[in-house]
Image (cartoon, grey):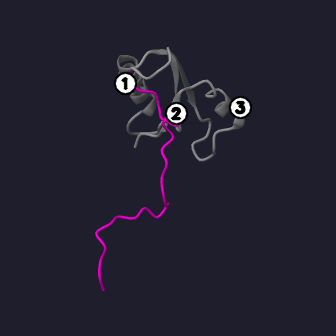
């Protein structure tokens, strides 16, 4: 059996939509709004993702022209975010969602 030296992506041809990528320094059209969705409001133990988002916010502000931040917490860890919560992120250029463990 002969093995080909070519890598084949199982998705077929992948086209990157550069307009859909997150903002980069020098590529934004003015100030941007970024969002953080924290999956667990009061962690019972371990690291706190809310504090981590504050560190990320400082880094984003250093790298991008950030004019506003939306930071929300899901009311219940095990349930999806509701439509009203997700609607608060509509103006965001990007949203970081997470849970620190």
Q: Is residue 62 above or below residue 18?
A: above
Image coordinates of residue 27 in percent, x first then y, are 43, 23
Majority SS type along the magenta span: loop
Name the mark on residue 55: 1
Identify the element where label 2 is drawn.
Answer: helix
Determine which residue is flagged by label 3.
Answer: 84
Which mark is nearer the camera, 2 or 3? 2
Judging depth in this view, the residue of 12 and 40 nearest the camera is 12
Judging depth in this view, the residue of 75 and 24 nearest the camera is 24
- Is residue 4 part of the magenta span, yes or no? yes
Image check: 101 left or right of 88?
Answer: left
Determine which residue is flagged by label 2.
Answer: 19
Which residues lie in the magenta part? Answer: 1-25
**Residue at mark 3 to residue at mark 1: CA–CA distance:** 26 Å
Camera sees residue 6: yes
Residue depicted at x 52% and y 32%: 95
Q: Earlier in the sequence, mark 3 or mark 1?
A: 1
């Amino acid at each position: 059996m002969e093995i080909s030296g070519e890598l084949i992506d199982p998705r077929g041809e992948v086209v990157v939509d550069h307009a859909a990528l997150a903002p980069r320094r020098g590529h934004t059209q003015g100030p941007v709004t970024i969002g953080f969705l924290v999956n667990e409001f009061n962690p019972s133990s371990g690291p706190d993702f809310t504090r981590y988002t504050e560190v990320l916010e400082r880094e984003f502000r250093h790298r991008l022209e950030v004019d506003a931040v939306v930071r929300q917490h899901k009311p219940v860890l095990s349930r999806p975010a509701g439509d009203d919560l997700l609607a608060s992120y509509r103006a965001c250029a990007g949203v970081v969602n997470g849970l620190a463990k």
